[in-house]
Image (cartoon, rainbow, N blue to C red):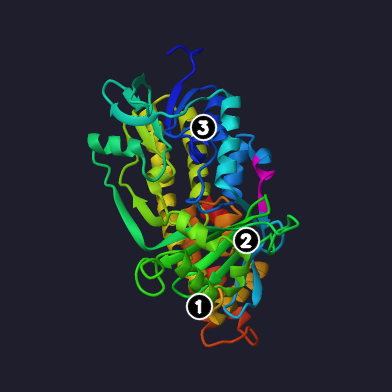
Amino acid sequence: MGTDTPRHITLIGAGLAGALLATLMARAGWRVDVFEKRGDPRVQGYAGGRSINLALTERGRHALRMADADDAVMRQAVMMRGRMVHALDGRLQLQRYGRDDAEVIWSIHRGDLNITLLDLAEQAGANIHFDRRLDAVDFDARIARFADGQGGLHPVGFTALVGTDGAGSSLRGAMQQREELGERTEFLDHSYKELEIPPSADGAFMMEPNALHIWPRGHYMCIALPNDERTFTVTLFLPNQGDPSFASVRNGREAKALFLRDFADAVPLIPELERDWDANPTGLLATLYLDRWHLGDRAVLLGDAAHAMVPFHGQGMNCAFEDCVSLAHHLQASSDLAQAFAAFEAERKPNALAIQEMALENYVEMRDKVDDSGFLLQRELELALQQRHPQRFVPHYAMVSFMRIPYAVAQHRSHVQRDLLVRHTAGRTSLEGIDWAAIDADVHALLPTLEDAVA
């Protein structure tokens, strides 16, 4: 290939990761083609009702900044300072995510974000082909065949394919037919349903807008995230079996009864609760694991196509965006595609596994612990130790959401810190009289500085 000829990459899927990666690669001078099975959402509108609102954190914002997309995206984002916990008796408590408004996360609507990123990808020079579903791949001949929905099939030559087509990835299926990827999916025994809180009659938010609202109820919960059009996207997470569950709550009328019993303060805010329940699909929750993410120099997977996770840490999109930055870096650093794909997989796979595990753990925390006195005391000690040892003791949430240290490092340090918090708050109802000297010694003995940990 001549030095003046742009290198070529073909992406399968024009969702969030596909559009961002297309922008990064086109801006780096690559020829980029993106094939998307759906129609153009800017023409046909975005199909809602089955995507949990997205929480944008520093990892995702860094990736957006790399593509000069941050300003356009942040115009649609709503700041969330913390969890607004709704007790069964209606009491409210804001639990901040960080120390101040410099440590927040941002709520954003998936459809709006996708449209913004598609515009930016095209402006960067990427070619996006809508209504093109991947039908088959001949990896030896490097020809992908796409169906157009009208019965037509379109063979397209490629240099390398990148699967940015989500948890149900068609490219992953084609790769599996060629070589075993070690795919396994573990479904959570819970599912979810989306509802909506509209604006008030005068167009304002119906609740505090700068928070992630959560109604924790032990084995299940409801959450609500703000949107820039003054609505909230409400998501109910329920077990699949038992009472209550999706087996016992079968329609909008039964859902209304459940809300009146367990989420009473939310009922006046959701006027179309019964209609939304019956109209919107029930979403499944699963974790996808693969032993391999790439086939030599011919194909590689990223984001949900490689490592779908449950949504309880708000990191699925942020992790996928980190994948995009990593893959773009490795593709630029090496002219050998197989080497670039292998280096990308080696860097990202342990970190994807770490956040998958942390996301599963965070579901238990959100639904069962945020209103627990022992958990709240540990949180108080955590914040105190962050003040005392800012280079060593960084709260779990801060490492995951406000920093870009590798997920695997954050996971390891979080486990060490959690053990320390549990040990030093055991049997206590307050921090009064606690042995600070012993705790400080523990911190120094167990936790190297973050700078040393990621060096």
Q: Residue at x 67, y 52 (%)?
A: 78
Say whether residue 452 is left or right of residue 278: right
Total number of numbered discs in the rendering: 3
Q: CA distance from mark 2 to mark 1?
A: 21 Å
Residue pointed to by mark 1: 422
Please check the rendered image and state whether residue 303 is part of the magenta-colored stretch, yes or no: no
Of residue 192 and residue 277, the one placed in the foreground of this image is 277
Which amino acid is tagged 3?
Asp
Read off the magenta span: 73-78
Residue name at image x 29 percent, y 28 percent: 137
Comparing marks 2 and 1, which lies closer to the viewer? 1
Residues packed near mark 1 inside 10 Å, few (<14), some (14 to 19) or many (20 plus): some
The residue at the far right in this view is: 202
CB within 8 Å, label 3 to label 1: no
Q: Is residue 303 above or below residue 42?
A: below
Q: Position of residue 445 (x, y in %)?
A: 52, 69
Q: Which residue is mark 3?
A: 40
- The first of marks 2 and 3 along the sequence is 3
Sequence order check: which comes first, mark 2 or mark 1? Answer: 2
Residue 375 place in picture, x, y as percent: 54, 76
- The residue to which callout 2 is attached is 391
**Can see residue 381?**
yes
